[in-house]
Amino acid sequence: MSRRDLTPLEARVLAVLVEKESTVPDSYPLSANALTAGCNQKTARDPVMEVGEAEVLATVEELKALHLVNTVSGSRVVRYEHNAPRGLGVPGAAMALLTQLMLRGPQTAAELRQNTERLHRFADVSSVEGFLEELAGREPPFAVKLARAPGAREARWAHLLCGPVASVEHAVAAAQPRDEEVALQKVELAALRAEVAALRSLVNRIAAELGIAP
């Protein structure tokens, strides 16, 4: 499907609505105040945001134009609900994965299985990877598998609903700064060795002039 990239706040608002539908069903659909609190939540969020209700409401209007959020009528307080699976054209299991990626940033398949427990229960990590591969194979892709970071046991996944992920390039080039650091250390080591050799030569010369053993 043709779509534009979401802004980080649009992704946060959408993900909060999806999350809260499962985690606090008695309060869902959400009021503007509850939605703002969910966006500014300090736990299970990366990055942590600090946005005002006016910003959130303006973002809701943008998401409504994209058919991803709806206003619920019939209440004294205006409330909002998501239309994410239908709006994005993905099944509920895949939406659970995208939601956690939007809320918490890049994660491994094992981490995603654990973090989506309250949104969708996956049988095993392989089933998580299967849905991630499907998201990565879409056109345009909704997810990407990042290059495994040096020392990491598993590769992480990231969503692409906000466009290309900067850490993709960073992950691929992660070894480069380390290579440069090692090269710099080698230069410094060579300089220290040269300095030691010069000092040793000086000591030997002084000892010879004094007629003592170095």
Image (spheres, rainbow, N blue to C red):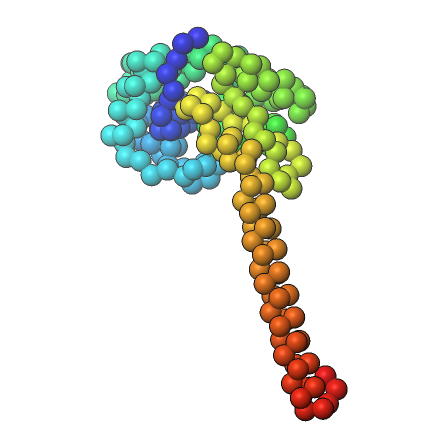
Quadrant containing the N terminus in the rendered view:
top left
Q: Position of residue 128 (x, y in %)?
A: 62, 22
Name, please, the residue furthest toward the top.
Answer: 1
**Residue appearing at x 31%, y 21% in the figure:** 60
Residue 153 horizontal side relative to residue 74, left or right: right
**Residue 150, located in which quarter of the rendered image?**
top right
**How far from the left and from the top, in percent, is residue 197?**
65, 70
Q: Residue at x 40, y 9 (%)?
A: 2
Q: For the point 36% across and 34% down, which residue is it?
A: 37
Judging depth in this view, the residue of 155 and 209 nearest the camera is 209
Q: Residue at x 48, y 36 (%)?
A: 44
Q: In the displayed structure, does residue 75 sit left or right of residue 207?
A: left
Is 54 or 6 nearer to us in this picture? 6
Query: Can residue 93 be spotted in the picture?
Result: no
Q: Give percent across and percent down for residue 25.
A: 45, 23
Residue 203, by quadrant, is bottom right
Q: Indicate whether 179 appears above or below 107.
A: below
Q: In this rendering, does residue 142 appear at all?
A: yes
The spot of residue 124 in percent (x, y) is: 68, 23
Q: Quadrant of the C terminus?
A: bottom right
